[in-house]
Image (spheres, coloured by chain):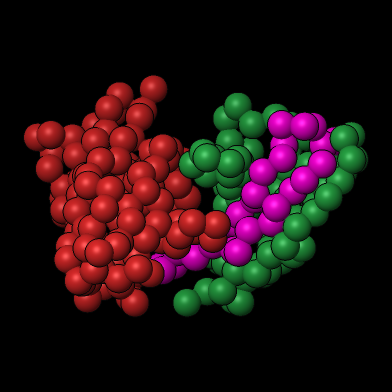
Amino acid sequence: DIVMTQSPDSLAMSLGERATIDCKSSQSVLYSSNNKNYLAWYQQKPGQPPKLVIYWASTRESGVPDRFSGSGSGTDFTLTISSLQAEDVAVYYCQQYYNTPYTFGQGTKLEI
Amino acid sequence: QLQLQESGPGLVKPSETLSLTCTVSGGSISSKSHYWGWIRQPPGKGLEWIGSIYYSGSTYYKPSLRSRVTMSVDTSKNQFSLKVTYVTAADTAVYYCARHPYNAEVPYYFDYWGQGALFTVSS
């Protein structure tokens, strides 16, 4: 199984600050034939299902504010929130879909 | 707007079978471009993928759960289902159904999720 490890486990920031969450996979999730990274990011608010934020490591899902961005390739990825808003408080998960079993990171709790 | 809704009994006794159904509305489960998956989340913990199914019945299962898990699809009702046998307290979780796009490889990320349903294993 591909192990996904996020850092930090929790993050406390101030409104307007830049937040970064890292995700490392135990093996590359870059598919060489199409040069795509099979990596997604989700946001989960309390009592709600996860919501897709980023896929293919850097493609923002429709309707997601442009303060959210994803970067990285191979085994190292980052989710960046450029200017933190109160509504961004949530747990964020990375997930690889390079192969099955699909695996998620342990989550990063973002607080204000 | 696509919607997914999980249903099933909320309480199951140890060693019995947990049965869940996901009803899809606003879209067709027979789409050739999507797989349909189950993910669970124990209270206060992270996300675990259980398995995914195509409208044709083709499945992917998490290997460590394969011996206890069965997924099925009913295209006439626009539903897919999950059965987990011989449940223990470790199977207590919020169970989500979700959709993933598919393009002749493995299915991709999960783009639509149900609200989730808590299933508790207890005598």
> Residue A33 placed where, x, y %?
51, 63
Whether residue A20 is visible to the viewer of this picture, yes or no, is yes
Residue farthest toward the front in the current orientation of the protein: B123
The answer to whether residue B14 is above or below residue A63 is below
In the rendered structure, does residue B84 fall within the stretch colored magenta? no
**Residue, x 36% and y 28% (percent of image)?**
B2
Q: Colour of chain B?
A: red
**Residue, x 80% and y 54% (percent of image)?**
A11
Task: Left or right? Give the position of B19 relative to A27.
Answer: left
In the rendered structure, does residue A109 fall within the stretch colored magenta? yes
The quarter in which the N terminus of chain B is drawn is: top left
Task: Left or right? Give the position of A38 relative to B30.
Answer: right
> Residue A101 placed where, x, y %?
41, 69
Task: Left or right? Give the position of B74 relative to A65.
Answer: left
Task: Left or right? Give the position of A87 relative to B92.
Answer: right
Range of magenta residues: A83-112
Q: Nearer the viewer, residue B46 or B73?
A: B46
The quarter in which the C terminus of chain B is drawn is: bottom left
Quarter residue B71 falls in: bottom left
**Residue, x 49% and y 41% (percent of image)?**
A49
Q: Colour of chain A?
A: green
Whether residue B101 is visible to the viewer of this picture, yes or no, is no
**Residue, x 52% and y 74% (percent of image)?**
A2
